[in-house]
Image (cartoon, grey):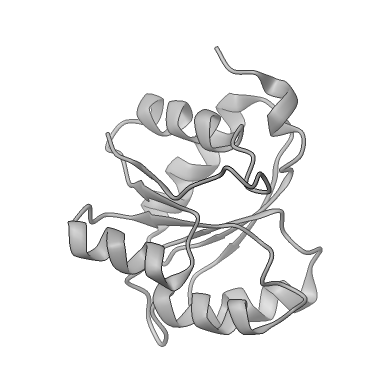
Amino acid sequence: MFNLHGMKRYKNILLIDDNVDDQVLFLEALKNLNQGFQCTIADSSPQGLTKLLAYQTPDLIFLDINLPAMDGFEFIKHLKKDENYNHIPVIIYSGSNDKNVVMKSKKAGASVFLSKPFKLEDLVYNLGVILNLDFESENFVFDFFTS
């Protein structure tokens, strides 16, 4: 179904999402891809920033927008200011697919906007595609995924 070669480049993932059901679905989708991903979970943006310092630097960050204490856009602003982490692709993982939110995500510096799906198989498929993207390519452009 997917070229699994590309997925090997992105093994360490940081998921920042305060919704436990969404966290469980995300972890189940990664497990279904069967590629041995390591996923660290943070329930808030401040906790995500703390985990950036405490754990191995992630290859990708999946970030909800509506978070307690600091929203996802503010998190991206902090991340992009730090030369140790500003290279990490950020995938907005949101329950919204409002065009204004999508464009604000792009402007903030996100690489991809992924609308949270309702079905596991949709998330597995979208993650499979996203994890095969070449974020470092000069031809890479902001992308939007919805179910």
Q: Quadrant of the C terminus?
A: top left
Most extreme residue toward the top is 1
Q: Position of residue 14 (x, y in %)?
A: 62, 59
Q: Position of residue 4 (x, y in %)?
A: 69, 22
Q: How many marks?
A: 0
Quarter of image, res 80: bottom right
Horizontal side of 64 relative to 103 (left or right) equals right
Look at 48% across and 76% down and name the residue there.
Answer: 44
Most extreme residue toward the front is 138
Look at 22% across and 52% down and name the residue there.
Answer: 97
Answer above or below: position of 92 versus 117: below
Q: Position of residue 42 (x, y in %)?
A: 56, 68
Horizontal side of 84 relative to 47 (left or right) equals right
Q: Quadrant of the N terminus?
A: top right
Look at 41% across and 34% down and name the residue there.
Answer: 123
Look at 46% across and 52% down and name the residue there.
Answer: 23
Answer above or below: position of 124 versus 141: above
Q: Which residue is nearer to you in this view: 103 or 57?
A: 103
Quarter of image, res 78: bottom right
